[in-house]
């Protein structure tokens, strides 16, 4: 997932002349050319010009016969008549014989502020297709952590989808200076993580946890933050934040390499997981875990680059579909034929199968977006559902971090329901679906109580709901 108001989909505007580009290249020019100042127009033609002191052509006399000379001395000399004003030049067409008109100087158009954005750009809606995918991915994560269904990752590989969407937004953001983009991403990630981590760390300290120097990973999660077994269910999800942070730091280099040979780099991005699985086994420590996760989801992150740069649109549909289905088929075959090694066909336990299944599945989703131009704009007709999608995307970090704690707290809360005879009689207290519902109620409470931290991290005014 990507957080920030710099998300997938989520496309942004590029002011003409000044300002920062945001990826879509839509300028604000009106598309009309103005006449140069000082050259007025009248009826589509230049104004007639006056030529003072010039003789008109075409009136020279032909032959004048001689007459007898007259005695002019007997007559008084006539007073000179005033010289007539020259007539305007004759023009053909409807404007012939028009009197001269004094030109009116043109006023320059008002100058907009240098970084002002056009109103239509400010009101441009987000890409609801990507927003919907992210919202569904978060729901699937909560569902998997509630029921533990091994097949859930095959139906909808949430982590691969979120990494692909984050890669798309990162490629879009890197149209600005890389250092500013990285600093913005870290700023939007760490404050919600620190706020959540404070409660988790204090709770583990109360439950006899003795930290060492590795506690620094609770400040910057470049490695898996440490903890005790009591809080494991809460902190075990932090692998995603650690992997996301490393992808953000590596993105300027990855994007530069990708643009040298886009298709070749996209295909070869599956090579690291093959090396890690068949040729070299990483060490069983923080470094090995981080390396394995980066290799597993590298293709999905690069796929986000390919979508953003328009590479997917140029690919042949037949080749994309065949190769994607081949990747999914290989991943499924490997997962089901190697259950003895992991005890399950759960993709989360088999990095190689996870990498290829996510690669094929997410490629089809992203290619459908590029080829058919799907935008889910009709989602706006369902106001409540559209509102939920908006909240999930604006509070994605909060939802991801706090959902496990919500599920943990749902268990003792339901235990108290057994003390109420009416609840024991009429409520399905033993059902996991009931716990699932209580978990979502607690998630909603955490979004209201803790979601404002994401607003502060994004330098926005804190709000209960976006």
Image (cartoon, rainbow, N blue to C red):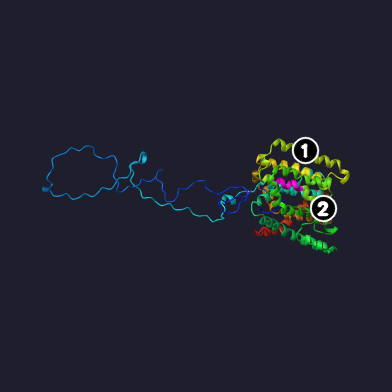
Left or right: where 50 falls relative to 64: right
Which residue was labeled with disc 1? 326
Residue nearest the observer in this picture, 157 or 254: 254
Neighbourhood count class around disc 1 (C-alpha, 10 Å): few under 14, some 14–19, many 20 upward: some
Kindly report which numbered mark, 2 or 1, lies closer to the viewer in this rendering: 2
Left or right: where 214 falls relative to 132: right
Image location of residue 20, percent across then percent down: 60, 53
Cα distance between the residues tagged 2 and 1: 28 Å
Residue 165: mark in rendering: none
Residue 356 in sight in this render:
yes
Helix, strand or loop at disc 2? Answer: helix
Which residue is found at the position 74% from the left and 58% from the top?
A: 193
Image location of residue 328, percent across then percent down: 78, 40
Residues rendered magenta in the picture: 297-305
Residue 288: mark in rendering: 2
Q: Does residue 302 show up magenta in the picture?
A: yes
Which residue is found at the position 88% from the left and 45% from the top?
A: 341
What's the magenta bit mostly, secondary-structure-wise? helix
Quarter of the picture holding the C terminus: bottom right
Residue 422 in sight in this render:
no
| Number of disc labels | 2
Image location of residue 15, percent across then percent down: 57, 51
User: Which residue of the protein is positioned furthest toward the top in this rendering?
Assistant: 318
Residue nearest the observer in this picture, 393 or 261: 261
Counting residues from the start of the chain, the first of labels 2 and 1 encountered is 2
Q: Does residue 26 show up magenta in the picture?
A: no
Neighbourhood count class around disc 2 (C-alpha, 10 Å): few under 14, some 14–19, many 20 upward: some
Image location of residue 372, percent across then percent down: 66, 39
Please tell me whether residue 1 is drawn above or below residue 334 in the rendered image: below
């Amino acid at each position: 997932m990507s957080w920030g108001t710099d998300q997938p989909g989520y496309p942004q505007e590029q002011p003409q002349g000044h300002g920062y580009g945001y990826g879509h290249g839509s300028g604000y020019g009106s598309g009309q050319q103005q006449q140069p100042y000082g050259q007025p127009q009248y009826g589509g033609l230049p104004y007639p010009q006056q030529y003072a002191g010039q003789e008109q052509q075409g009136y020279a006399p032909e032959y004048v016969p001689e007459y007898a000379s007259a005695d002019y001395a007997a007559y008084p000399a006539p007073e000179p008549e005033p010289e007539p004003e020259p007539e305007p030049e004759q023009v053909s067409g409807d404007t012939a014989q028009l009197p001269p008109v004094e030109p009116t100087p043109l006023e320059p158009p008002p100058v907009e502020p240098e970084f002002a954005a056009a109103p239509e750009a400010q009101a441009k809606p987000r890409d609801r297709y990507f927003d919907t995918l992210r919202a569904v991915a978060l729901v699937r994560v909560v569902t998997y952590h509630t029921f533990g269904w091994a097949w859930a990752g095959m139906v909808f590989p949430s982590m691969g989808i979120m990494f692909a969407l984050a890669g798309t937004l990162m490629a879009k953001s890197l149209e600005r200076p890389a250092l500013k983009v990285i600093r913005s991403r870290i700023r939007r990630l760490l404050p919600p993580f620190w706020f959540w981590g404070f409660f988790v760390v204090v709770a583990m300290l109360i439950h006899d946890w003795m930290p060492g120097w590795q506690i620094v990973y609770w400040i910057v999660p470049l490695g898996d933050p440490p903890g005790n077994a009591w809080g494991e269910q809460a902190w075990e999800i932090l692998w995603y934040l650690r992997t996301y942070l490393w992808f953000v730091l590596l993105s300027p280099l990855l994007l530069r390499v990708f643009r040298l040979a886009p298709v070749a780099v996209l295909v070869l991005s599956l090579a690291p997981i093959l090396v890690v699985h068949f040729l070299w086994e990483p060490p069983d420590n923080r470094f090995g875990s981080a390396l394995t996760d980066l290799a597993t989801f590298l293709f999905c992150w690069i796929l986000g680059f390919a979508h953003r740069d328009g590479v997917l649109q140029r690919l042949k549909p037949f080749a994309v579909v065949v190769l994607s289905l081949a990747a999914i088929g290989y991943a499924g075959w490997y997962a089901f034929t190697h259950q003895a090694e992991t005890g399950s066909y759960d993709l989360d336990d088999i990095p190689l199968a996870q990498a290829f299944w996510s690669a094929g599945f997410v490629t089809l989703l992203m290619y459908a977006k590029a080829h058919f131009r799907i935008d889910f704009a009709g989602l706006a007709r369902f106001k409540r559902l559209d509102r939920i999608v908006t909240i999930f995307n604006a509070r994605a970090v909060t939802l991801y971090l706090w959902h496990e704690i919500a599920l943990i707290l749902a268990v003792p809360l339901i235990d108290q329901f057994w003390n109420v005879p009416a609840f024991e009689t009429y409520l399905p207290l033993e059902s996991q679906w009931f716990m699932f519902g209580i978990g979502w109620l607690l998630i909603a409470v955490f979004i209201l109580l803790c979601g404002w931290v994401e607003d502060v991290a994004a330098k926005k005014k804190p709000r209960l709901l976006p």
